[in-house]
Amino acid sequence: MTASTASEPRAVAPRTVGVRAPAPRQRRLQTEIPGPASRALQQRRGNAVAAGVSSTLPVYLTSASGGLLTDVDGNVLIDFGSGIAVANVGHSAPAVVDRVREQAGLFTHTCFMVTPYEGYLQVCEALAEVTPGEHAKKSVLFNSGAEAVENAVKIARAATGRQAVVVFDHAYHGRTNLTMALTAKSVPYKHGFGPFAPEVYRVPGSYPYRDGRSGDEAARTAIDRIEKQIGGDQVAAVVIEPIQGEGGFIEPAPGFLPALSAWCADNGVVFVADEVQTGFCRTGSWFASTHENVVPDLVVTAKGIAAGLPLSAVTGRAELLDAVGPGGLGGTYGGNPVACAAALGAIETMRTEDLAGSANRMEAQVLQRLHALATETGVIGDVRGRGAMLAAEFVQPATTEPDADLTKRIAASCHAHGVVVLTCGTYGNVIRLLPPLSLSDELLDEGLTVLEHAVRTEARS
Ligand SMILES: *Cc1c(COP(=O)(O)O)cnc(C)c1O
């Protein structure tokens, strides 16, 4: 496979399909990262792609399989990001590829709002089975996480006849207008993009490492703020990530989520769990709400649902979903048949391969290594997460001040050595690990060894 290094724009993409080399089995570095062919593409990109869309690691890929990414220079990288918690079943999982191929050959679109098809029904039936709670459930399908979050708010407002929406410090819910308002962090998500949607109220959440409060204390603070500043009877929905993703992989203290959920039930408020990043076995069970026996009224899903094809959903109590009249929900592409086929393949893979069990095994292995690294180096203030959604927060040892610069250098060192890690956090000082749940023990071990080396080396410099 040869990649063009031409720098002038071209009308037609090079044909690289048709020749299928056997999938690589290990990390392999043939050039520096990014290599010359990736750098040439990156230069071309500068003339054609908006600057506002950035890439963590500008290495251009030609294929991906399991937990390995192959780039245009022939390098093979270990993937600890899964395209941001999307490739939970691994890249090119056979059940996904087969179903997508078959569906693409049958039809790629009819619009469910015009002439429907069974795949959409099957995905909604599967969502009712795998989401928390035994009550009657219905679903509606969309294209992106942000779109699904927006629709959860629409449904909650229609069902309650109220307007206020409560969100939390460090929250991330997307980049559309309403979800920008729900998202906490200004740069880069909101800065310069106002005005934002009204009737969105932010309250403190639970960040045990930094606030030192118990779950009950944190919930009392949030609830007091809601009751005093908004009024419980004005609130349509509380929207919360059971473990905050972009905000820093922040796991609330035990008791926080159950207390909020109970308050919502007592006050006629719709409890919306944004499980876009935590869902689909990522945290060692189908959904993270389950870890504290919380049963959300609405669950928002996307990312891991369809192994990368654009699909998202709002699933929840049947009476809530039915509160919106015909035509009030939908969209041209929502629940696209090829995306539904991918979702059915992904869900089947999660079941047959017990990927929740795999995530739990990864948790044990990774946490033990990160804790040892924290003790050894002193630059990791907190190790946290669940299943295969794990993180280390980097700090100045003396003060626990966030150390974003060190975090950047560690990520860059991992990238240079062929391991794709992502950072996150309001303060940019968290390295997050989101490996495909199907990643082999050998590759997980190898990737962790690279990370350990990066932390040791950069902590000293
Ligand atoms: C990624 C993410 C979203 C937004 O999903 P998009 O598909 O990027 O619109 C919303 N909520 C959470 C928790 C996310 O991680």
Image (spheres, rainbow, N blue to C red):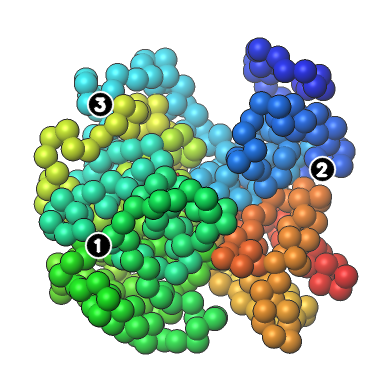
Image quadrant in which you'd find residue 331 = top left
What amino acid does circle 1 point to? Ala
Q: Can residue 459 be seen in this view?
A: yes
Q: Earlier in the sequence, mark 1 or mark 2?
A: 2
Q: In this view, does 373 lie to the left or right of 437?
A: right
- The label shown at residue 164 is 1
Label 2 sits on what residue type? Answer: Ile
Mark 3 Cα within 10 Å, few/some/many (few <14, many 20+)?
some
The residue depicted at 43 percent of the width and 35 percent of the height is 310
- Label 2 and label 3: CA atoms lie apart by 44 Å
For the point 73% across and 87% down, the residue is: 398
Q: Which residue is drawn at 19% across and 73% down?
A: 232
Q: How many marks overall?
A: 3
User: Where is residue 322 shown, x and y percent of the image?
Assistant: 12, 45
In the depicted structure, whether residue 57 falls above or below residue 390: above
* Disc 2 target residue: 33
The mark that comes first in sequence, 3 or 1, is 3
